[in-house]
Amino acid sequence: MRHITGADWPHITALEAGAYTPLGLSEERAALEAKARVSPATCFVLDVDERPAGYLLSLPYPDGEYPELSAARAPAVRSANLHLHDLVIAEHLRGLGLGTRMVRHLTGTAAAAGYARVSLVAVAGSRAFWTANGFTAHEPDRPDAGPQGYGPGAVYMSRPVAAPVPVPAPTAGQQAGEHTGEHRHDGAVPHGPTPHEESGRRI
């Protein structure tokens, strides 16, 4: 896990497009870079075999609010809330716990930096993954009052930084040394957070 460099952006945009273009939620590179510029210390790349295999974008944002998708500028705000805008893991590496690993890294970073909460918008059926990682949904008053622009069924979620990320108990097969992987929602489409394990927007 490391911070993002300029050379990472072609890989990040390719991962993002693969996760979100089928959902109609993909953003331009300029919009992604704008969010990362606000808080480079809370944006990360995960390397596998010396190649970016996942990324996470987060930035301080007012509690209860969320960035506009595709906006070419992101406001720099002072907030005790860190918004996990996006988390994507390469499709061939989903199910291995890498999404949960990145969430743990982010919450540790948030705690060290003095943030009180982490928020995200869960999209495309990723709510179960985020719930398993300690996030609670903020149910809208009306079915059509959820986060705007994030697709049908999007829900705003958050968790206190101090809350530990649950560690799943090993199955009988894992106890016997069998590798079974994880549920596909470990890929997190938060937008922090999709039904893809590690494509989490909205993270």
Image (tube, rainbow, N blue to C red):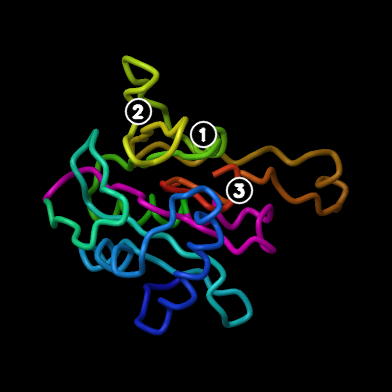
Q: Is residue 100 magenta?
A: yes
Q: Which residue is mark 2?
A: 146
Counting residues from the start of the chain, the first of labels 3 and 2 encountered is 2
Q: Which residue is mark 3?
A: 196
The tag on residue 143 is none
Q: Is residue 126 above or below residue 40?
A: above
The residue identified by callout 1 is 127
Q: CA distance from mark 3 to mark 1?
A: 11 Å
Q: Earlier in the sequence, mark 2 or mark 1?
A: 1
For this rendering, which residue is in front, 116 or 198? 198
Classify residue 74 as left or right of residue 174: left
Disc 1: CA contacts within 10 A as few (<14), some (14-19) or many (>=20) = many
138 on left or right of 53 = left
Helix, strand or loop at label 1? It is: helix
Q: Which of the 4 quarters of the picture holds residue 162?
A: top left
* Span shown in magenta: 78-102
Mark 3 vs mark 2, CA separation in Å: 21 Å
The x, y position of residue 87, in whole percent, is: 46, 55
Q: Amino acid at mark 1?
A: Arg
Q: Is residue 47 above or below residue 50?
A: above
